Amino acid sequence: MVVYIEYVLLDNLVIDYFLLKAAFSISKTPYKKIRIFLSAVLGAVFALLYPLMQIHTVILTVIKILFGFLLVLISGTFKNAKEYYINSVLFILLTFLTGGAIIGAYSVLGIDYSSEISIAVMVIPAFAVIKSVTAVIKYIYRRKTVLSEIYDCEISVGGSAVSLRGFFDTGNELFDGDSPVIIVDKRISKRLLSDISSMMKIKYITLKTVSGEDKMLSVKSDKISINIGDRINVYSNITVCFAKGSVGSGYDVILHPALMEGKNELKSAEKVKKVS
């Protein structure tokens, strides 16, 4: 029985530590490992005493949720009540998802999750679930952020005009001389370079990237129109580089942040007709 208690304490300490760390990581809230550790210790002690409470299941659940809020309060320093609430909800959500996933997996595999050996190795599946759930939540959040920065645009080169979906990437700091550089998906190149007049503009340029220098196939656009809210930003002579593969999911071109504001703006009623 002593070994069983040690397993429960150790498992819950490690799992609570990972859960708290994951919640702060998702919300991008600064944290100190020592505070998370001390909070996890308290959580481990609570997990040991929790089964001994002989009260109604609903009340037990409420107590467990409130204790989760307490653990988050102890483990972090928050700018305001909203930040604290978000981290608390994330911690509780991760806790229930992790517990449910482990019980479900053990049931499918026919493993008794209350056995000594199951409890002894509980940390391993718990860690895998926490990492997976955290990755999924971060992906969904990033996806939502990306979609909010996607705009309809049209690029004209020579006799070709193509309607695309563009993503404003604040990390795109590429310039070709004084010209901002936009990067188009590889599969779009054939549509933009569909006639001789556009193909004659092709050239290689050398760009400095975070990994060094890279040569990319490029053309100068005749016109780029970007629909931003109730206006259209229109630019000419912008360098269009062709990526060696896909630029991302849900969009065709990485736009330069310098194109978010422009001097040449058309009213919504004067929108340029798009050509598919």
Image (cartoon, rainbow, N blue to C red):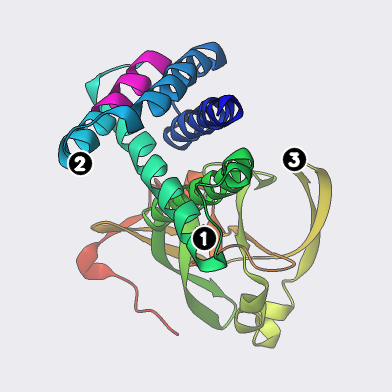
Which residue is found at the position 56% from the left and 16% from the top? 33
The span from disc 1 to disc 3 (Cα, nearest Å) is 42 Å
Q: Can residue 61 be seen in this view?
A: yes
Is 232 placed left or right of 225 in the picture? left
- Which circle marks residue 105 in the picture? 1
Residue 272: image quadrant is bottom left
Indicate left or right for 163 with 120 as reference.
left
- Relative to 115, 94 lies left or right: left
Q: Residue furthest front?
A: 1
Q: Which residue lies most toward the bottom here? A: 195
SS of the residue under disc 3: loop
Q: Which amino acid does label 3 sit on?
A: Val
Given contact means CB atoms under 8 Å apart, are the residues at marks 2 and 1 in contact? no
Three-letter code for the amino acid on which mark 1 is drawn = Ala
Residue located beneath label 3 in the image: 210
**For the residue carrying disc 2, how many other residues have a C-alpha within 10 Å: few (<14), some (14-19), or many (20+)?**
few
Mark sitting on residue 74:
none
Q: Position of residue 141 (x, y in %)?
A: 42, 49
Q: In which quarter of the image is residue 225?
A: bottom left
Q: In this view, does 261 lie above or below 88?
A: below
The residue segment tinted magenta is: 66-77
Q: Is mark 1 on a helix, strand or loop?
A: helix
Q: Earlier in the sequence, mark 2 or mark 1?
A: 2
Q: Is residue 4 shown above or below 232? A: above
- Give 259 or 37, whichever is nearer the viewer: 37
